[in-house]
Image (cartoon, rainbow, N blue to C red):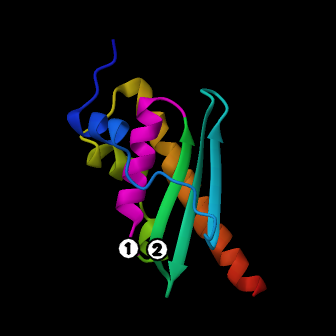
Amino acid sequence: MIIYSEKVMEHFTCPQNSYSMPDANAQGVYGDPACGDALIIFLKVQDNTIEEISYLVFGCCASIATSSMTSVLAKGKSLEDALSITEEDIVRALDGLPENKVHCSNLGVSALRNAINNYYESQKQA
């Protein structure tokens, strides 16, 4: 039996910022083929700051909770600060994850970084 923290269960049962954002100005995708989880992060960036962030996640309890926490940690941050969010930051903010679920934190970090890089690329072409 897997035991999750109260914080993980809170973000699993009531995920924050979970919706599609058709007018996003950046998006990042990341999937973990080993477990089948996938995440799409949408960003609205203004003045180098993440004004709005949302996501669609397909996966287990830990994937949903880590995606939710990633959005909470990134919202309102500068792109530079958001790029520095680590898997450890997400796990710590969730009061830990079972050892066999720690890899789920990689989902949020990777999709967020892909979204930010997507934003930077789009700005070069503008």
Q: Is there CB contact under 8 Å for labels 2 and 1?
A: yes
Picture coordinates of residue 117, whole percent (x, y): 64, 68
Please tell me which of labels 2 and 1 falls first in the chain: 2
- Nearer-the-camera pick, 74 or 80: 74
Secondary element type, mark 1: loop
Mark identifier at residue 1 = none
- The structure residue drawn at horizontal position 46% and vertical position 70%, both measured from the top left corner, is 52
- The structure residue drawn at horizontal position 63% and vertical position 58%, both measured from the top left corner, is 28
- Nearer-the-camera pick, 14 or 47: 14
Residue 80 to residue 59: above or below:
below
Picture coordinates of residue 54, whole percent (x, y): 50, 58
- The structure residue drawn at horizontal position 38% and vertical position 45%, both measured from the top left corner, is 15
The amino acid type, in three-letter code, at marker 1 is Gly
How far apart are the two marked residues, 2 and 1, measured between alpha carbons?
5 Å
Provide the residue designation for mark 2. Answer: 50
- The structure residue drawn at horizontal position 39% and vertical position 40%, both measured from the top left corner, is 65
Task: Decide whether the magenta segment is chiefly helix, strand or loop.
Answer: helix
Give the extent of the magenta segment: 59-77
The quarter of the picture where residue 121 lies is bottom right
- Nearer-the-camera pick, 69 or 104: 69
- Residue 27 placement, left or right of 65: right
The amino acid type, in three-letter code, at marker 2 is Ile
Residue 100 to residue 56: above or below:
above
Provide the residue designation for mark 1. Answer: 76
